[in-house]
Amino acid sequence: MSTGYLYQVIVKVFLFEIVNLLLLYFSILHSNAREYVSNLSTIIMLQFCTATSLTASKDFSNYYFFKKLMRIFILFTLFFSLFYSPSYSQWLDGGRQQVNVLDGNGSLIVSEDVMYLWNGQNHFQTSNNNGLTWNDPSDSIGGANPHVRKMSASNGRVYAGLNFGTGNGVPIYSTDKGITWIADTLGAPGHALGWAGMPVVSDIYTWGHWLYVKWDQPRPYSIKSFGETFKFDSLMNEGINHPTSVISKGDTLFLAGNKIYFTTDGGATWIFPKNNGYTGISGKLFVEGIRLYMIAYKAFAQPCTLFYSDDNAENWTEVDISSLAKNKDLAGNYFYPSDYFIKGKNIWFAAGSVKFNTKPNIYKSTDFGVTWTNDTLGLETSFVNGVNCFAYTNDGYLWVSPSYHNIFKQKISDPSGVTQVTEPRHEIDISPNPCQEQVSVCLPIGVYDAFEVHDILGTIIIQGINISHLTSLQINMEKVTSGSYLIRFRSKSGKVSTSVIVKE
């Protein structure tokens, strides 16, 4: 065999291998596990066939050369698949029985170690063992074609926004883990279009012993305590305060209006923090530990960005996610999450579809938004597909509820997989609250050096300095009249933490 012919063969083999690796890379990105293994096997078989055809060439003196060359390529292919594919997590089937994959999914939540899912075929389903097995309680809802897009749970109650698609839609709740459901309509408004006077729920969220509801009607926002009547809140119903999303930390409910604001007493009083550094417009809230996240647009027809705050929205830090957010979906809109999930420096972002007949468009960043990769390995394809929500179980699995097919999960909390936030924690614990004579405050040492207690008019009625060496302090409220008061802790660097004290 001439040297020139040998070089030609080697070039062709290398080109063949490049094509194989590109096919393998595409398979990693867009196939489920079974398809991926099948594609990998096919590629290796093609390599064996190529080795056989080459060794049967004009000159058998090159037999051992080509045999070694193809062995190297096969080993390299296996190494590439083993090294590269683990960086793309595998979504696994959620373990539910579902006959018709086109029966849509709705909300998926986890509360008190119980998973709750609404699905068009099975309606409400629950799991007590992190999705290993699923229970299908008897349908106690009634009505035709019920549909639930949103569920929320707190303090032993699971609430759902139930809509039948006929104007008959109500808030319902269960106190027995989804076995029976009760309508909660005391004080609820009629529907804006007059559909038999029945209210329709656009959004629902529960925290502490309170319930927030957005109705499909002109004055949509209301809050109530469990067992009491709905009350429309005038502040929330002001245009600039209309919340596009809500989230809670303990008894504190945060709302995303023109700026972020919150309540610690079920809407009796409202706190408007400074929102330093926040330049977003409304948006979608998320909480991890003490950290509050917000994905929002900074301007009309511009990509969204990520913000976070460690002091209850007093100060915000902006995170550039434009490498993903600058992309556009089928409708020509910039990517905006139907839902997102953050754990440490890992972010999952569910965007709109970029074409038909694809898997749900989920992206993952392992470096806090700097770079992104498509995270769809193991998910199913539908003509039009999206993501309703993410949920997390205490065994370290992230769950996703797509528009159709089953629900899926992937392991995310292996020690080598998720980097937790290691910044110092700056919690302040105040008790008892409400108080009568005095309150005890537990402080992170060395963080705050002064505090002020303000009345509702902003007047300072109590203050203290040089407290940075303290881990606790007592504030005497004996001579203070009953009401709600704002307490601010300040550091020399300008950091501010705000809480509310209620004097009975």
Image (cartoon, rainbow, N blue to C red):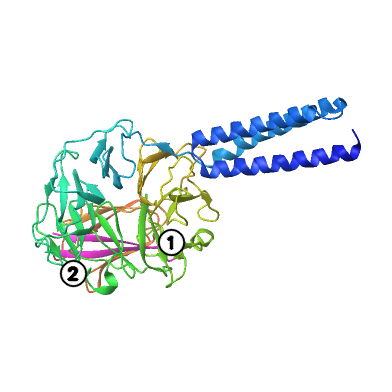
Residue under the point 31% across and 36% down: 99
List x then y, in percent, for residue 276: 41, 69
| Magenta stretch, residue numbers | 482-504
Residue 382 vertical placement versus 395 (above, below): below
List x then y, in percent, for residue 64: 82, 25
Residue mark closest to the camera, 1 vs 2: 2
Q: Is residue 493 magenta?
A: yes
Q: Amino acid at mark 2?
A: Arg
Residue 465 visible in the current orientation: no
Residue under the point 67% across and 43% down: 19
Task: Report which quarter residue 370 is drawn in.
Answer: bottom right
Residue matched to label 2: 219
Q: Nearer the viewer, residue 431 or 402?
A: 402
Task: Report which quarter residue 270 is drawn in.
Answer: bottom left
Residue 78 vertical placement versus 404 (above, below): above
* Structural distance between the alpha carbons of marks 1 and 2: 29 Å
State the mark number for residue 33: none
Q: Quadrant of the C terminus?
A: bottom left
Residue matched to label 1: 307
Q: Main secondary structure of the magenta part?
A: strand
Residue 89 visible in the current orientation: yes
Whichever of callouts 1 and 2 sits on the residue coming sooner in the sequence is 2
Q: Is residue 468 left or right of residue 257?
A: right
Q: Secondary structure at mark 2?
A: loop
Q: Is residue 259 left or right of residue 41?
A: left
